[in-house]
Image (cartoon, helix red, strand yellow):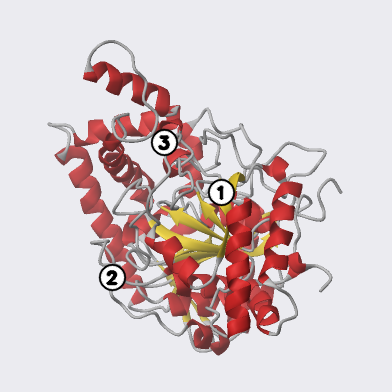
Amino acid sequence: MSDLLQLSAVDARAALDAKEITATELTQSYLDAAVQTEALNNYVQLTHDKALEMAAASDARLRAGTAGPLEGIPVGVKDLFCTEGVETTACSAILKGFVPPYESTVTSKLWADGAVMLGKLNCDEFAMGSANETSVFGPAVNPWSQSDGPDLAAGGSSGGSASAVAAQSALLATGTDTGGSIRQPAAFCGVVGMKPTYGRCSRWGIVAFASSLDQAGPFARTVADSALMFSSMAGFDAKDSTSTNSPLPDLASAMAAGVKGMKIGIPVEYQRDGMDPAITKLWEQGQAWLTDAGAEMVPISLPHTAYALPCYYIIAPAEASSNLARYDGVRYGQRIEEGGTLDDMYEASRAAGFGEEVQRRIMIGTYALSAGYYDAYYLKAQKVRRLIRNDFDAAFAGVDAILTPATPSAAFPLGVKQDDPITMFLNDVFTVPANLAGIPGMSVPAGLSSDGLPLGLQVLAGAFYEDKMYQVAKVIETQSGFSGAPQRAAGRAHS
């Protein structure tokens, strides 16, 4: 076949089954593409030899007729997932040299289904950021950046995952989403990014940020590819106390069903001042596409989502400050020996190991949990979170899904927002509510900004109703006909 990189994951699986290509050929193509697009800095480590070994094993299973659902499909792994025998740093200096002796549940499930590991992907340090600029390895670059313009942010925290899938240096990729860290970079890079219902995918073996919010999910170039990968990632895990034993709905049937007769909620609160007019226009166009396909648009109100960002930026740092207390230079990762006491070693290791954004969030979280402030901040934020969840529960009593913009703007140049944390936090204004409510959400590329950059629409559904989300997302994908290709994708680099 002329260009293996153009195949979707679904088509690649069919070609592998038909013996038209081999897993080794497909994997080598993606390894070559990763080298070709190295300047995008989306990989922090290519596992070249391991990838080819896994591909050879896939070819053997394909020949034997024992292939799994993802057999031979090359996958990039966000550097937040522990990978046995492969360094996992969460893109932080404090975990430099940490090689896990175990595999995360999500990646274990992918490898059991035949996927091939290409390497570890760049992300914001401990997943704290919206532009992949807090990584100790430097920022991942959006492949939609023009060769004669500034490098654009790939989004965060899963910027490396979105960049690699868009740049055709990974066919699929894992991500995590705590406040939009899958959906926002997916929108910036013109790919499909999906956050499942909280509890759908095991958190075991994923470096924790905020335990009540974190959820793993897939990056893909098509909605069908996303469903294929999600089906492998999801499932009950007894090692994760927050994992839910709820059967996965039939996503294939949902995507084939269309939206005729469905009711789609349009929240009035999501029309914000200062939003890019192109995004407002795309949102209206999305409503028209779904109406044309037979769905009914229903105005809804989500009044407490106005408080989602301040609520999130109390809960997430509070949980992070607790989770990151384990990184002290004692058992693993970087240790700085200064002074003569244990406290000196703790202080030096954490000061040298954590970046500014991580330190900022640890301090905010520690303050919010401190004696005298716990009730005023953390407890009150949890009560607001309940009100946000109640708003969504009330909305889904009358609609099947909700349609919103994915981001308030297209991708921005690297560096322009890093010095203003509040401006950076506002990138998550449309995505954070779903994490607080624990519901699934997906960003689908659907159009271009006036500057020719990708824009996404977000589809939300009720908890454990991922089938309805995929149902709507598939129609948006079909109706939009989005086929934009970034300038710096493999085979187009330097064009």
Which is more N-terminal, label 2 or label 3? 3
| Residue at x 31%, y 41% (from the top left corner) | 320
Q: Quadrant of the N terminus?
A: bottom right
Mark 1, Cα crowd under 10 Å, few <14 / some 14-19 / many 20+, is many
> Mark 1 or mark 2, which is nearer to you?
1
| Residue at x 46%, y 31% (from the top left corner) | 93
Mark 2, Cα crowd under 10 Å, few <14 / some 14-19 / many 20+, is some
Residue with the most extreme left position: 372
Q: Amino acid at mark 3?
A: Leu
Q: What number is the disc on residue 95?
A: 3
Q: What number is the disc on residue 121?
A: 1
Residue that badge 2 annotates: 244
Which is more N-terminal, label 2 or label 1? 1
| Residue at x 15%, y 40% (from the top left corner) | 375
Q: Are marks 1 and 2 in contact (CB under 8 Å)?
A: no
Quarter of the view holding residue 445: bottom right
* Horizontal and vertical percent position of residue 70: 55, 73
> Mark 3 or mark 2, which is nearer to you?
3
| Residue at x 67%, y 41% (from the top left corner) | 152
Q: Is residue 231 left or right of residue 284?
A: left
Quarter of the view holding residue 57: bottom right
Where is 380 relative to 243, above or below? above
Where is 284 relative to 48, above or below? below
